Structures are given as C-alpha cells and as structure tokens.
Amino acid sequence: MEKLEELYEGKAKRIYKTEEDDKVIVEYKDDATAFNGEKKGQIVEKGKLNAEISTIFFELLEDNDIPTHLIERLNDTDVLAKKLDIILVEVVMRNIAAGSLAKRLGLEEGTELSQPILEFYYKDDDLGDPMINEYHIQAEEIADPNDLEVIKDLAFKINEILVEFLADKGIDLVDFKLEFGKGTDGEIYLGDEISPDTCRFWDAQSKKKLDKDRFRRDLGEVEGAYQEILKRLNL
Ligand code: C5P
C-alpha cells in the first residue's frame, strides 16, 4: 500500500490517504511536543520506536478482542490503519496519581489510587484540551451517549489488559490517554497510539520514569527510556 496525499499533520504523526477509501497510513514522526505545543523538540528515532511499541500494544489488544484501527505495520515508521472519524473526546485512565491529577487533587505523585479513574478531555488544541464530564459531552453533543458507554467499557477493559501485561515486564502503568473513532462501517475502534508519548510508565522497582515526562521535565535519557520500554515489551 502506497502513501497518497497527506490528509492531516498532527504533533507526532502524519496521516496519508491510500488507494483504499477506508484505510490510511499513519507515519510516526520524531517530533516531540509538550504543554499543548509550547515546548518543542525532537527525540532521536522516536517515530520508529513509537510505531513499534504502539503496534505491540494494539496487537495485544486485538488478541484480547478489543477492536483497534491497526491493520499492519508497513515499515519502521509507517502503519496501515482503518480510517476513523475520530470522536473528539480523549479518555485518560489513571491507576497511580501523577501529572495533572496529582496537581489538581494535591496528591503526592506515586499515590496508588483505590480504583482506576477515568477522565474525559475535549480534544481541542485551541482550548488546550479542557477536562469535561458526561454532561458537557451530552449538552454540547460532543459524542453520542451510546458511543460513550461503549468507549468507557473499552477503556476499563484496555486498562486491565495493559496493567497485567506490563506488570509482567516490571512496568507500572501509571496513566495513559486513549482516542476512539468510528470506522466506515460505523463501528467504534481504538485509534491513535499507545506509546511512551501517551502513557506514564514507571519501572516497578526503582519507579524511574520511562516515558515522555523525561522530555516534559528535562530529566535527560529520553531516547534511552523509549528504548528500554521497547526492550521490555519484547522480553
Ligand atoms: O497531564 P496528565 O497528567 O493529565 O496526563 C495523563 C496521561 O495522559 C499521561 O500519560 C499523558 O501522557 C497522557 N496525555 C496525552 N495527551 C494529552 C494529555 C495527556 O497523551 N493531550
């Protein structure tokens, strides 16, 4: 399958048309951004690492009956995927307090949550992706209520699958972001990516951060952290 015209360029990926209307090619870039694009940089080989890491996670989820957009990885940075109409709700799942949750609730980073927390954010760069709840989503018709029920159910299932898989690799899944969309068949699929750009991964023993927080917080060894995640996933 060949890349045709570019349909969209995001902060970390480009999406291309293909000869088939229901399929796109997702190209992972080395560009890294944080704080809604205010901090910009490059992470060496990030495109390749994230394409590979995300493919491993999406294959794991497919094997566990989660519908995803993944069709196949084509080369180092390119993945063939079902074309989705992205639902403008970002779903964040949290197992351990960190980042904006720790700040908002005054919790110490690393505090284990008594149960997973699901949050919704409105996918809108101009607004800085504000947090919303189901009432905002309904009132503003951001997503269909039935679709939202499906998405919530999938998000909790995905969390269970990933937590168990990563625990086996000595990694704590602190939190992560998911995006869903509708395929040309009208079904809901998991889209976007699952990678150190979109998840917080901590080494289970040392609690060392192995994700984009190393870039966000200038902690150094950014590439090494992404490489370490890939190495562990392949163990
Ligand atoms: O910043 P915050 O603590 O809300 O992020 C929660 C999780 O969602 C983190 O794993 C972060 O990487 C991810 N996230 C993301 N894209 C965003 C916002 C958050 O991947 N726009």
Image (spheres, grey):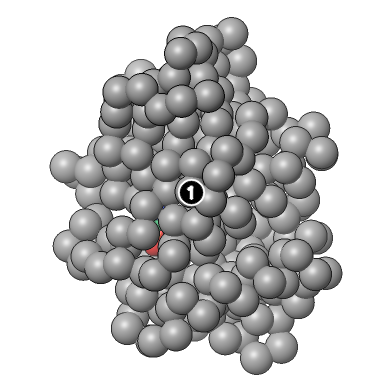
- 79 or 85: nearer the eye? 79
Where residue 43 sits: x, y (%)? Answer: 37, 69
Where residue 13 sits: x, y (%)? Answer: 37, 44
Where residue 157 sits: x, y (%)? Answer: 73, 43
Name the residue at 69% across, 51% down: 56
Apparent side of residue 126 relative to residue 61 in the rendered image (left or right): left
* Quadrant, the C terminus: bottom right
Residue type at tag 1: Thr
Name the residue at 55% across, 31% down: 80
On the question of residue 84 being in view, the answer is no
Residue 42, by quadrant, is bottom left
| Number of marks in the rendered image | 1
Q: Which residue is mark 1?
A: 77
Name the residue at 76% across, 46% down: 60
- Please, is residue 55 above or below residue 181 in the view? below
Name the residue at 32% across, 62% down: 32
Q: Residue furthest bottom?
A: 206
- 152 or 58: nearer the eye? 58
Q: Secondary structure at mark 1?
A: loop
